[in-house]
Each structure stands twice: as structure tokens, then as C-alpha cells.
Amino acid sequence: MDKGYPSVNKAKRLFIDYLGNSFLMWHEGVLEEYRSFGIGTAQESAWFEELKASFLSRLSQGDYSAMGDLWQMGAQDALPNILVVSPVGNSWTKLRFAEDLWRFTNMHTSHPAEPDVIRQACKKAIEIWQDLLHSATDIDVPNDVMKIAANGRTPHDYFRDRLNSNLNRASATGI
């Protein structure tokens, strides 16, 4: 098997393009190609950490879309770094940040966070939702969301309903 430089570059490109997620590679029909390069777990771990660091850097600069990428990677072990981020922006941005944070706490992954960190993340999401429920004034729900989900409600009502739904779901967990 050729483990030359071009093969490693191609394998790394696939790893990065599919966020190290073998399911995504399989789904897109490139998993067998990726496996044909014979990349070892040590190399995959190094690429995983490199990719995770890149997304955490973006997140620390206010690019909250990086949370979705970290989630796709199954990088729950990134939670300690995510917890130090305080979302800024309008209420919708903060709502989505807290929802993504909550989603991180419920993933099954080979890169898990410690249970205490997961509880801290749950509590932070709940705190953000509670704060928004009591103080949100700059509600700016994107038009595409309102077209799909509003069902005749005002943006304010939709936002409040979504917050309450999130808080009810969190309450059911006992946290």
C-alpha cells in the first residue's frame, strides 16, 4: 500500500472534509477510498485534535457555526473549551448557542467529556435560556425560520415558545 506523501495528503483532505466522521464518509461514498490509505489511529487522533483546535479557534473569535462542526465531529471533549465562550450578539444568536451547547451534552461519542463538565454545560444552557426569557428585547428571528416554524405567531411569541420548550425539556432531566 502506498503511504507516500500524496496519499497522506488525500487521506487528510478526506478526513477534514468529512470532519473525521466515518458515517459521513460512508454516506457520501468515500469511506472505502479513505480506508484504502491505511491511516492509523495515531494519525487520525492527531488530525482530529488539529481539526478540533481549528474549530475552537473559530468559536473563540465569535464564529458560532464552529459548534456545529465540532458536534459533527463528535468532539464532546471540546466542552471545557466551549464553556469559557460567552455568546454575544442578538437574542437569536444566544438562543442557538445554548441549543447547540445542550445538544453537545446528549451526544454519544468516542470523545466524551467528563460527567461534571456535561452538567456544567447543561446548567450554562439553562442559564442562557432563563436569562433570555426574562430579559430578551432584541428578538431577531431569521425570516427563513419564521416562514417554516412560526405558524402565525409573532417572532416574539415564537421565540418565547421555543425558550419555554427548551426549559421544559431541561426541567425533565432534573438538572
Image (cartoon, rainbow, N blue to C red):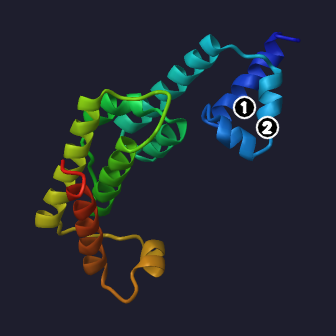
Camera-near label (1 vs 2) is 2
Q: Nearer the viewer, residue 36 or 156?
A: 36
Residue 30 relative to residue 57: left or right: right
Q: Residues within 10 Å of mark 2 (few under 14, many from 20)?
A: some
The residue at which mark 1 appears reads as 14
Query: Where is 130 relative to 87, above or below?
Result: below
Circles 1 and 2 in contact, beta carbons < 8 Å: yes
Percent coordinates x, y for residue 5 in the rendering: 80, 12
Task: Identify the amino acid type marked 1.
Answer: Leu
Query: Where is 20 relative to 88, above or below?
Result: above
Percent coordinates x, y for residue 22 in the rendering: 67, 35
Looking at the image, is mark 1 or mark 2 earlier in the sequence? 1
The residues bearing labels 1 and 2 have C-alpha atoms spaced at a distance of: 8 Å
Q: Quadrant of residue 6?
A: top right
The residue at which mark 2 appears reads as 30
Look at 18% across and 61% down and name the residue there. Answer: 132
